[in-house]
Image (cartoon, rainbow, N blue to C red):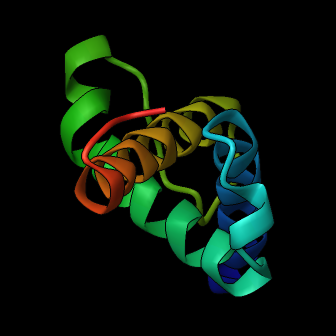
Amino acid sequence: MGWIVAIIVGGVAGWLASMVMARDGSMGIFWNIVVGIIGAIIGNAVIAPLIGIGGSIQTFNLGGFIIAIIGAIVLLAIVNLVQRGRVR
């Protein structure tokens, strides 16, 4: 059951991050899910220890969701930097 929640929460987090980074038109639902899940991994590994909140996206909680969105935004910023040479 946890992987279903991770896919749903990852998809929403990836979609919100793509809206913030103005990449929504170039990403489909699959890439939103991938970006959200990888963003959650990045967020929980790097950002969560720094600010003291976090959590798994397999069990929905607001802290984990916010960390997933922040991690997905960081991931998309890195992708923008590599693809275009600048961050939007």
> Which quarter of the image is occupied by the N terminus?
bottom right
Residue 34 location in percent, x, y?
54, 77
| Residue at left offset 49%, top offset 34% | 70
Residue 69 location in percent, x, y?
58, 40
- In the picture as drawn, the residue positioned furthest to the front comes out as 84
Residue 82 location in percent, x, y?
24, 57
Q: Is residue 6 visible?
A: no
- In the picture as drawn, the residue positioned furthest to the top comes out as 51
| Residue at left offset 25%, top offset 47% | 85
Q: Quadrant of residue 16?
A: top right
Q: Is residue 57 left or right of residue 72?
A: right
| Residue at left offset 78%, top offset 70% | 8
| Residue at left offset 49%, top offset 35% | 67
88, above or below 79, in the image: above
Question: Closest to the observer: 35 or 7?
Answer: 35
33, above or below 16, in the image: below
Q: Is residue 15 left or right of residue 66?
A: right
Q: Quadrant of residue 3?
A: bottom right
Number of numbered callouts drawn: 0
Residue 20 location in percent, x, y?
68, 34
Q: Is residue 5 visible?
A: yes
